[in-house]
Amino acid sequence: MKTNDNLPWPPFYRVKENARAKHVILRVGAETGLVLTVPTGFNPRHIPRVLDRHRDWIEKALAGIEKPWRDYQRADLLPQSIVLEAVDTTWAVTYRPGPVKTLELAWTHCPPRLQLQGDFSDVPACCRLLRRWLREEAKRVLRPWVHTTARQTGLSCTKVKITTPKTRWGSYSSQGTVSLNAALLFLPRKLVEMVITHELCHSLFPRHDRTFWNLVARHEPDYVRLEAALKSATDRLPLWYQASFL
């Protein structure tokens, strides 16, 4: 078996117990590293043997995430400006060094400016702080946008929730809550309107059936092209935002 001498062995790993697991499951992710899911009551003394048995796969998987991890630690990842295309606004970002292990973020709307103050050595931590700001800004912008669209279309919702998931632009709950991804602010306005209209149409038709899409088409005739564009819209997310999930 060929080994990678550049990686320590055994690597750092986390163990999760799952009552439904019938055997040990190994997963490697950029955010999580190596995770072993084991059946409840699994004897931890067997873990070194499991790791050795799958060493080649583990080392290849860990090597595959090493470069992206290093990329997300680069100081030049921190933005000098943040463009919110949905609302045609550019926020200037300034950095003011401060005490070690402290981070604070302040902002003003006139002009749109962010100031990050503290220790910038942990780049993902800085990015997470910027992501929290984005969520607050999205609450200010997207909530009234949804209610305005609801009035214009005659559709309804009871509540608007702003979150920052990695894989979904929006959803509509059985309680009438529209949930939107704060990262929508990075997208063109037309795509944001498409997501809002899509979720509001679920107030009448919860499933993606023919009646649902007929309703969507009534409010947005160009929905096929826009829905297709949304599938690749994550390419528009800046690197600092992606690093915020580390």
Image (cartoon, rainbow, N blue to C red):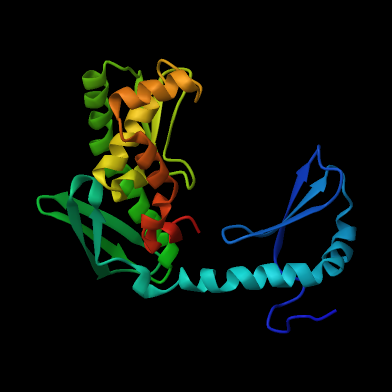
Q: Is residue 32 above or below residue 227?
A: below
42 w.r.t. 123: above or below = above
Residue 48 % position (x, y): 85, 65
Quadrant in which residue 164 is drawn: top left
Going by the picture, which residue comes out furthest to the bottom? 5
Rendered residue at 44%/46% (across/down): 231
Q: Residue at coordinates 76% horizontally, 68% vertically from top-left?
A: 57
Q: Nearer the viewer, residue 119 or 202?
A: 202
Foreground residue among 104 and 52: 52
Tell which of 108 and 157 is nearer to you: 157
Q: Residue at x 66, y 69 (%)?
A: 62
User: Residue 12 falls in which quadrant of the image?
Assistant: bottom right
Residue 119 shows in the view: no
Percent coordinates x, y for residue 16 in the rendering: 74, 48
| Depicted 104 relative to depicted 7: above or below | above
**Tally of marks:** 0
Q: Using residue 105 as the reference point, say whether residue 240 is left or right of it.
A: right
Q: Position of residue 132 (x, y in %)?
A: 36, 48
Pinpoint residue 226: horizontal percent, then vertical percent. Answer: 35, 41
Taking the image as drawn, is residue 203 in sight?
A: yes
Quarter of the picture holding the N terminus = bottom right
Left or right, 206 with respect to 2, comes to left
Quarter holding residue 96: bottom left
Residue drawn 38% across the image and 74% down it: 75
